[in-house]
């Protein structure tokens, strides 16, 4: 890619800006004044909502010769950065200008099922050409995300294959903030298509395959009626903040600055990496939650919907490509230029040294078996049925694929109890596991015990196990699923209810 100076305004967002900033593009300001009237079915109250999200088809100029048409929030990609305040009630009008019902999911927030944004939990849809006013108290503080939560199945114009994703920051009551400024980065692919087999990185996660799980996966393959692999989704175009590498404004930095990057993987199903040659990332928060052991790493790895907040000390002047370590994806757009003041020239990429992503380095070291026992443990074994559903892989949890027809809860929770979920992955795929409306603490991952890493999405490696604990402290239907749209739509979901 060439043309470093082309493109629209910078992705940089000053901390002092009031919500909702981060607009770029022609239709960026939320049309709150004209929005709420004229929808007889679900007319919002006459007062103006604090925020408006309008869902409609629009164009994203990834590069001058790569303009895609997709569904967007407020006519822009990413959706506007929403800054909310922890504990302060907020109203959001969602206006759906499309022909199909929609849902906005407030990912990573502890809010009621009626507004969480999952139909499986009973959240009402925003009707086609209709409006719904949402009201909730944002919590907890930190880097969150909002995105559509509708079923896509084989329709790559639906769900998270579209541009319906945006960053959200819940301001804490106090902010230690040992950094000079913040930069939000949303990583996202466009132009999806179905193919047989993928080329996703598989071997970057810490830990080793467990032979019993490999054997179980092999038996499932042998039992499959169809021997061919199921469909996977691939992409032609890659972007950071809606621009292919070299087509947006560079991130302009000064030597000596400490820049806090808030990185969001806004993909429908891809795992992303990010490196900045000559620099390291000091990871201070995962999924918006401060980590016990801030640690420097050369590469960030993020499963779908994961977020990483990391400080980069700018000590290596030059013009650099900050990008995905996958050469093909980076060449097709997954990168952004970092330019030091006074430096000129073509942006340079240098391949980082081999590195394995290990969540436990950010946690507290604990001895094997030392973690306090939970009140209850729930085990889930994940099996793939190759191409079992119209050519798509079907996923089962303990032998059961989630039914979108019955939406039956499979697990009962008692309020106040601490649960341990233990996952055993009998497939070679990596699964970004997501629990709605609750945070969880990693207790065992990559073959090691850990403590203190609090998340809402975590990558489970192929043929490995992991365990996390959560406290049932937010009554209401609660969805658990793989955050890969293709996996969740084909069985990889389960519903918890409070009994
Ligand atoms: Cu999955």
Image (cartoon, rainbow, N blue to C red):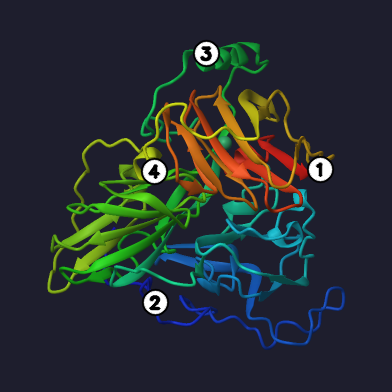
Question: Element type at marker 4?
Answer: loop
- The reply to whether discs 2 and 1 touch (Cβ–Cβ < 8 Å) is no
Q: Earlier in the sequence, mark 4 or mark 2?
A: 2
**Residue holding disc 2:** 15
Q: Earlier in the sequence, mark 4 or mark 1?
A: 4
**Residue holding disc 3:** 212
Q: Is residue 143 visible?
A: yes
- Residue at position x 62%, y 16% from top? 220
Distance in Å between CA atoms under marks 2 and 1: 43 Å
Q: Earlier in the sequence, mark 3 or mark 2?
A: 2
Q: Is residue 484 visible?
A: no
- Residue at position x 44%, y 63% from top? 242
Question: Viewer-proximal residue, 237 or 289?
Answer: 289
Mark number displayed over residue 363: 4
Q: Position of residue 206 (x, y in %)?
A: 37, 31
Q: Earlier in the sequence, mark 4 or mark 3?
A: 3
Residue 191 vs 68, above or below: the answer is above
Question: Element type at marker 1?
Answer: loop
Question: Element type at marker 3?
Answer: helix
Q: Position of residue 174 (x, y in %)?
A: 44, 72
Closer mark to the observer between disc 3 and disc 1:
1
**Residue holding disc 1:** 499
Looking at the rendered image, the quarter that the C terminus falls into is top right
Distance in Å between CA atoms under marks 4 and 3: 28 Å
Q: Earlier in the sequence, mark 2 or mark 1?
A: 2
Closer mark to the observer between disc 4 and disc 3:
4
Question: Viewer-proximal residue, 432 or 218?
Answer: 432
Residue 45 vs 261, above or below: the answer is below
Q: Earlier in the sequence, mark 3 or mark 1?
A: 3
- The reply to whether discs 4 and 2 touch (Cβ–Cβ < 8 Å) is no
Report the residue that reaches farthest toward the right.
41
Ligand 1 located in image quadrant: top right
């Amino acid at each position: 890619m060439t043309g470093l100076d082309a493109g629209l305004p910078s992705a940089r967002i000053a901390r002092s800006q009031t919500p909702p900033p981060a607009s770029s593009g022609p239709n960026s300001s939320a049309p709150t004044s004209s929005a709420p009237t004229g929808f007889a079915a679900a007319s919002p109250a006459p007062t103006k909502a604090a925020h408006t999200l309008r869902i409609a088809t629009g164009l994203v100029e990834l590069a001058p010769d790569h303009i895609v048409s997709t569904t967007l929030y407020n006519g822009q990609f990413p959706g506007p950065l929403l800054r909310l305040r922890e504990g302060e009630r907020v109203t959001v009008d969602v206006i759906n200008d499309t022909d199909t019902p929609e849902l906005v999911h407030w990912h990573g927030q502890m809010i009621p099922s009626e507004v969480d944004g999952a139909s499986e939990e009973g959240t009402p849809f925003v009707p086609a050409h209709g409006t719904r006013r949402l009201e909730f108290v944002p919590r907890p503080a930190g880097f969150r995300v909002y995105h559509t939560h509708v079923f896509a199945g084989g329709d790559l114009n639906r769900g998270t294959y579209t541009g319906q994703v945006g960053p959200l920051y819940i301001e804490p009551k106090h902010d230690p903030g040992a950094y000079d400024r913040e930069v939000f980065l949303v990583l996202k692919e466009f132009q999806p298509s179905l193919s047989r087999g993928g080329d996703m990185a598989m071997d970057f996660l810490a830990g080793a395959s467990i032979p019993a799980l490999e054997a179980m996966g092999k038996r499932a393959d042998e039992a499959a009626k169809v021997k061919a692999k199921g469909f996977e989704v691939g992409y032609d175009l890659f972007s950071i903040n809606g621009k292919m590498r070299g087509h947006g404004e560079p991130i302009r930095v000064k030597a000596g600055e400490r820049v806090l990057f808030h990185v969001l993987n806004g993909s429908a199903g891809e795992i992303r990496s990010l490196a900045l040659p000559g620099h390291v990332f000091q990871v201070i928060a995962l999924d918006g939650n401060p980590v016990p052991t801030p640690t420097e790493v050369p590469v960030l790895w993020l499963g779908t919907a994961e977020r990483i907040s990391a400080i980069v000390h700018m000590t290596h002047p030059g013009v650099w490509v900050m990008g995905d370590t996958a050469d093909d994806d980076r060449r097709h757009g997954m990168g952004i230029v970092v330019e030091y003041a006074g430096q000129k020239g073509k942006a340079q990429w240098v391949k980082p040294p081999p590195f394995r992503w290990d969540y436990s380095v950010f946690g507290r070291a604990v001895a094997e078996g030392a973690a306090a026992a939970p009140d209850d443990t729930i085990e889930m074994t994940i099996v793939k049925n190759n191409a079992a559903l119209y050519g798509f892989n079907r996923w089962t949890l303990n032998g059961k694929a989630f039914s979108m027809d019955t939406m039956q809860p499979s697990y009962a929770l008692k309020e106040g109890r601490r649960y341990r979920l233990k996952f055993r992955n009998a497939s070679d795929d990596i699964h970004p596991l997501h629990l709605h409306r609750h945070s969880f603490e990693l207790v065992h991952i990559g073959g090691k015990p850990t403590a203190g890493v609090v998340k809402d999405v975590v990558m489970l490696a192929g043929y490995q196990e992991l365990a996390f604990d959560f406290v049932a402290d937010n009554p209401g239907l609660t969805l658990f699923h793989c955050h890969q749209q293709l996996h969740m739509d084909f069985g990889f979901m389960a519903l918890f209810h409070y009994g």
